[in-house]
Image (spheres, helix red, strand yellow):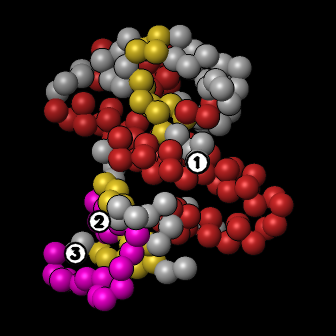
C-alpha cells in the first residue's frame, strides 16, 4: 500500500516519479496518489487506514468513519455554498429565516432529525445520503438537494467530485 501527496504550493514541480498509481484525487491544495480508494480515504479521514486491522468489526467501523466524515463534509459544503451565495449577492442574508439557516446548516447534524419533504430554497440543501431510504425509513427528499454519500468508498469519493470539491482520475485498468 502506497500513497503520495503532492502539495500545490506553486513553487514545486514535484511528480510521482516512476511509480504508477491507480488513483489520483485532486483537491484544492493537494493531489493524493494511491493504489486503492481505501488509501485515498485514509489520507482524508484520520485513522481510516488502520481500521482494516479490526477484523470482523472493520466494515462497520469503516462505514461509521465514512459517515462521520460525510457529516463533516456536508456541514463544510453547506457553509461554503451559503457563504458564496451571500458574498456574490445571489442571496440576501436577511431574506433567510432562522429556520432556513438551521435547515441549511444544522447546529448538530448528527442529533438533528433528517430533513423530510421537498426543499424549494434557492440555495441547495446538503444532506448525508445514508440518512435516507434505503438505509433508513426516512424518504429521500426532493427539490434543490445535494448529497454527500458515505455508503461505500466509491460513493463517498464520487460525491466529493459531484460537489465540486475534488477531481478523481482512475487508470482504465483499476478496479
Q: Is residue 107 visible?
A: no
Residue 96 is situated, as x and y percent measured from the top left of the image, at 35, 17
**Label 1 vs 3, first from the N-terminus:** 3
User: Residue at image x 24%, y 30%?
Assistant: 86
**Label 3 vs 2, first from the N-terminus:** 3
Tell me, yes or no, whether the highlighted magenta stretch contains residue 17.
yes
Q: Residue furthest right?
A: 56
Say which of 94 and 3 sits in front.
3
Secondary structure at numbered mark 2 = loop
Q: Is residue 56 above or below residue 113?
A: below
Q: Is the C-beta separation of discs 3 and 2 under 8 Å?
A: no
Distance from disc 3 to disc 2, alpha carbons, whole Å, reads 7 Å
Residue 90 is situated, as x and y percent measured from the top left of the image, at 19, 24
User: Residue at image x 55%, y 33%?
Assistant: 129
User: Dot 2 corresponds to which residue?
Assistant: 29
Report the disc number at residue 152. 1
Secondary structure at numbered mark 1 = loop
Taking 95 as reference, is 67 left or right? Answer: right
Query: In what quadrant of the picture does the N terminus appear?
Result: bottom right
Q: Is the C-beta separation of discs 1 and 2 under 8 Å?
A: no
**Magenta span of residues:** 10-31
Residue 151 is situated, as x and y percent measured from the top left of the image, at 60, 42
Report the disc number at residue 9. 3
* Badge 3: residue crowd in 10 Å (few <14, some 14–19, many ≥20): few
Distance from disc 1 to disc 2, alpha carbons, whole Å, reads 25 Å
Amino acid at each position: 500500500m502506497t500513497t503520495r501527496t503532492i502539495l500545490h504550493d506553486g513553487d514545486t514541480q514535484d511528480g510521482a516519479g516512476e511509480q504508477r498509481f491507480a488513483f489520483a484525487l485532486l483537491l484544492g491544495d493537494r493531489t493524493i496518489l494511491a493504489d486503492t480508494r481505501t488509501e485515498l480515504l485514509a489520507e482524508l479521514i484520520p485513522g481510516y487506514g488502520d481500521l482494516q486491522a479490526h477484523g470482523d468489526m472493520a466494515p462497520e467501523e469503516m462505514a461509521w468513519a465514512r459517515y462521520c466524515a460525510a457529516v463533516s463534509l456536508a456541514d463544510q459544503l453547506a457553509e461554503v455554498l451559503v457563504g458564496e451565495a451571500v458574498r456574490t449577492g445571489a442571496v440576501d442574508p436577511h431574506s433567510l429565516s432562522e429556520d432556513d439557516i438551521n435547515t441549511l446548516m444544522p447546529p448538530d447534524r448528527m442529533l438533528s432529525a433528517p430533513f423530510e419533504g421537498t426543499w424549494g430554497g434557492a440555495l441547495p440543501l446538503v444532506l448525508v445520503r445514508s440518512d435516507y431510504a434505503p438505509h433508513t425509513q426516512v424518504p429521500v427528499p426532493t427539490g434543490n438537494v445535494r448529497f454527500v454519500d458515505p455508503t461505500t468508498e466509491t460513493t463517498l469519493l464520487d460525491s466529493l467530485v459531484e460537489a465540486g470539491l475534488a477531481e478523481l482520475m482512475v487508470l482504465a485498468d483499476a478496479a
